[in-house]
Image (cartoon, rainbow, N blue to C red):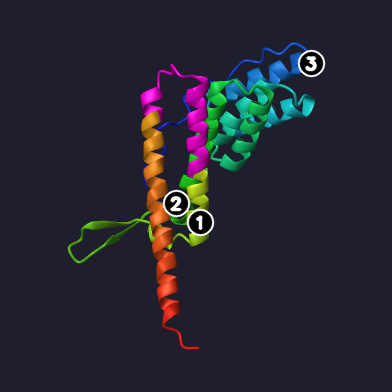
Amino acid sequence: MKKVVLLITILFVSVISTACINNLAVQELNNKAKEYMANGETEKAICRLRSSIDLDTSIFETHYNLGIALIDNKEYEEAQTSLQNAIKLKPDYANSYYSLAVAYEGQADKLVNKESDDVDSVKVDDSSNENITKVPDEKSLTEVEKTKIVELYNFAIDSYNKYLIKQPDAADKDKVTAQIEYLNNQIKKYNSERNTSFSDIKTTGAGKEE
């Protein structure tokens, strides 16, 4: 399974809202979260950003930054919620759609590589003393999981397309376009596998006596 190539390279955005009564506290929490992220302390950054949202839920930057931090921490479903909240507050900000697409891809990849969450690649010695790496088999995915993967990839494509619409002159336009093409190919692959499995079930049942 090809990894997501468009990993988050977008930096936190600074809080620029001035209308809220708790603005100074929100700014302080966001700035502290930015420092933690720069130092690789993602959990602490997430904690500060959640505290910031507790103070004021109307700040776009906090929801967006939390989404970025959650992606970095591989908490993809929560990241999607945060980024969707950010989009509601500021629908024209292109990077929110890009980041949301990455969150959808991350969740899909986690499903594809589900076995590696429990067991790392195992090395064994064969008769020739060569190391063999045991790789998780994608065929172990259930039909429900394949359906979910296709759904997530479709969501990612939709978000990437919205990113390009909002920012037609994006410097990474070619890379995003290539990623969309890759995801479409993955969707075709999983749909083909699902259709084959369904055909096998029908064929097996066809010979059953009443």
Would residue 156 be counted in the magenta stretch?
Answer: yes
Please state which of the two labelled residues, at mark 3 or mark 1, is closer to the viewer: 1
The crowd level at tag 3 (other Cα within 10 Å; few <14, some 14-19, many 20+) is few
- The type of residue carrying mark 3 is Cys
Circle 1 sits on which residue? Answer: 145
Which is nearer the N-term, disc 3 or disc 1?
3
Q: Residue at x 49, y 42 (%)?
A: 154
Q: Position of residue 38 (x, y in %)?
A: 53, 22
Please state which of the two labelled residues, at mark 1 or mark 2, is closer to the viewer: 1
**Where, by quadrant of the figure, is residue 79 drawn?**
top right
Q: Residue furthest bottom?
A: 210
Q: What whole-number distance in Å separates the C-alpha atoms at marks 3 and 1?
A: 43 Å
Residue 112: mark: 2
Circle 3 sits on which residue? Answer: 20
- Element type at marker 2? helix
Which is nearer the N-term, disc 2 or disc 3?
3
- The type of residue carrying mark 2 is Val
The reply, left or right, for residue 191 in relation to residue 81 is left
Task: Specify the segment rendered in magenta.
Answer: 153-176
